[in-house]
Image: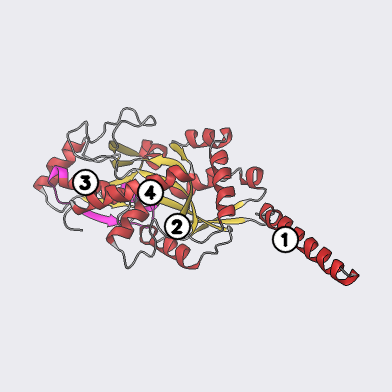
Amino acid sequence: MGKASKLLVLLAVFAIGLLTVSGPAMAGEYPDRPIKLTVSYSPGGATDFQARIVTMRAQTYLGQPIVIINKPGAGGMVGWNWFVTSASKDGYDLVAYNVPHFIAQSIVFPKKAKYNINNMEPIANWGTDPAVLVVPKDSPFNSVQDLVDYAKKNPGKVTFSGAGLYVGHHIALLQFQKSANIKTRYIPYKGGVPALLAVMSGEVMAGFNNTSDAFRSKDRLKILAVADLERNSFIPDVPTFKELGFAVDDASNNRRGIAVPKGTPPEIIKKLADTFVKMFNDKKVKGKMKLTGSGMKVLSREETQEMWKQTEATLQDVLKGLGDR
């Protein structure tokens, strides 16, 4: 072999070596700038509030801060539609998902909702937040039965607020209406905070909202029942609907976490999935969540994938039997 040929071989080997090294090195550099997290609800609501808590240690765990971007509207549809159609797939655009919200909307509005469990990639789940039935502090209703008795005598007169269409609040109301055999009027708001304010101000007669938001405002509300299979540790004196004889289960239970768009590189997904589970389990994060009445349920990427599939199957069944939408 001549000198020129040997030189070419050496150059080729050197180039292959560079390629081999550059792959992991490039992957290891992520992230090298702040990451954006889209929250599809208003600032100050439970999703926004909790997203800020669970990502407050991002600089420690990822080496970069996470910046919250709020895109509220249509029960989350505005933000999630933007995310699956316009977000970058390089790991710098994340989204806070809400289950059952985005899954129920993809079932009920398959043309309007561009998102579903197949075009978002779960990273990890951070929390659980059951829906609760709330009324103003000065409401004449002191129990669920008081409200049911009034609604039966005044069909369509009781107004309920919630954080949008086919979010957990709406699903809980639909189950409650069916079980109690009453007719009420649902008024969707742009998030949990405006929906809760509507209850506290008397703009509506009642509402379904998040346990965490209701817990922080419990001095200005009456919390009549929780839509879950067991009582909640933050409000242990509040009965479940099941205890009161109403067929309202945990289908409306709001679970929150982080997702990326389909097509995000697998090595970035793995890094985020491993990191977020550690970050969600951070003692400071858990402590802050507990202080604010925010329930935690940390699930890995694989566990979250399974939860999404099971939720979709459950909602397919639940939504069939809820009558006129």
> Label 1 neighbourhood size at 10 Å, few (<14), some (14-19), many (20+)?
few
- Residue 19's disc is 1
Of circles 2 and 1, which is in front? 1
- Mark 4 lies on residue: 308
- Mark 3 lies on residue: 175
- In the rendered image, residue 125, in percent from the top left (x then y), is placed at 46, 44
Image marks 2 and 4: residues in contact by CB distance under 8 Å:
no
- In the rendered image, residue 221, in percent from the top left (x then y), is placed at 33, 39
- Which element is circle 4 on? helix
* Residue shown at the point (64%, 47%) measured from the top left: 62
> Label 2 neighbourhood size at 10 Å, few (<14), some (14-19), many (20+)?
many
Of circles 3 and 1, which is in front? 1
Report the magenta residues as a range.
179-203
- Residue 120's disc is 2
Front-most of residues 315 and 17: 17
Can residue 136 be found in the magenta stretch? no
> Label 4 neighbourhood size at 10 Å, few (<14), some (14-19), many (20+)?
some
Mark 3 or 4, nearer chain start: 3
* Residue shown at the point (19%, 32%) measured from the top left: 244
- In the rendered image, residue 39, in percent from the top left (x then y), is placed at 47, 55
Mark 2 or 1, nearer chain start: 1
The residues bearing labels 2 and 1 have C-alpha atoms spaced at a distance of: 30 Å
> Label 3 neighbourhood size at 10 Å, few (<14), some (14-19), many (20+)?
many
- Which element is circle 1 on? helix
| Residue 79 sits in quarter | bottom left
Mark 3 or 1, nearer chain start: 1
